[in-house]
Image (cartoon, helix red, strand yellow):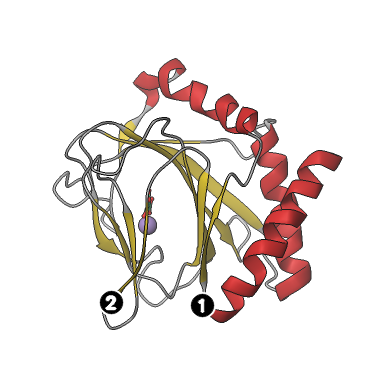
Amino acid sequence: MDKMQAETAAITADYVEPLLLTQGWAVIRDAVPSEWLQELAADFSKHRHEFKAAAIGKGRELNPDTRGDLTMWLEETDPRNIFSYLECLQQEFNRRFFWGLKRFECHLAIYPPGGGYERHIDNPHGQNPRKLTFLAYMNENWATGDGGELQIFSDDGLVLTEVEPRWNNWCFFLSENFPHQVLPSTKDRQSLSGWFRHDLHI
Ligand code: OGA
Ligand code: MN
């Protein structure tokens, strides 16, 4: 493991640990060096044609009214800095919470103008293979009024927080506990979405 990634992951974990324990979600600004995100953000133009409309649920149906993003899954063997940072973060969480995380998966997502993602939970009904959701936003010069906020809800439907998708803003929440939605934006909205999982590959 790279020392810089391990140190950065420890700093992130120090910050989010008490928040995950008390409220189950955390928002952290500028979690990683900007260059690490830039390495990923290059894929949005470089691999633009590989982004596919994202499907929902068991039937994997497409419904742009419910979910408007285009996604590209990243390889688990991706050698970039963010990946070793996320590996270190997984170790930190296992050490601190005994979660027994086995792996993570993630995709880049782009929401074209007017696209959002209606309220949902990141696990199939009755199953919780995904323990922790993470999101990193990659939009320079995002302004209030551009929309695209992530809203996280309590069980009884109150908005607990609203996260603006600004460059290097990160959000973590316990996947099984928090319904959430993405509000439509007025311009392209770019992000990394991922999940730390309990299960190995089948
Ligand atoms: C998802 C999701 C939220 C966001 O990809 O499941 O809820 O803010 N994304 O991009
Ligand atoms: Mn989600």
Image coordinates of residue 5 in percent, x first then y, are 76, 42
Which quadrant of the structure image shows residue 157?
Answer: bottom left
Which quadrant of the structure image shows residue 14?
Answer: bottom right
* Alpha-carbon span between mark 1 and mark 2: 14 Å
Residue located 73% across and 67% down the image:
94
Quick check: 153 above or below 4? below
Q: Quadrant of the C terminus?
A: bottom right
Q: Is residue 1 visible?
A: no
Residue 145 as seen in the image, left or right of residue 39 = left
Q: Earlier in the sequence, mark 1 or mark 2?
A: 1
Image coordinates of residue 59 in percent, x first then y, are 26, 56
User: Extreme front residue here?
Assistant: 144
Badge 1 marks a residue whose secondary structure is loop
User: Extreme bottom residue here?
Assistant: 156
Quick check: 199 above or below 47? below
Cβ of mark 1 under 8 A from ligand 1: no
Which residue position holds label 2? Answer: 158
Badge 2 marks a residue whose secondary structure is loop
**Mark number displayed over residue 23:** 1
**Residue type indicated by callout 1:** Gln
Q: Is residue 87 visible?
A: yes
Image coordinates of residue 36 in percent, x first then y, are 64, 32
> Viewer-proximal residue, 89 or 7?
7
User: Extreme top residue here?
Assistant: 46
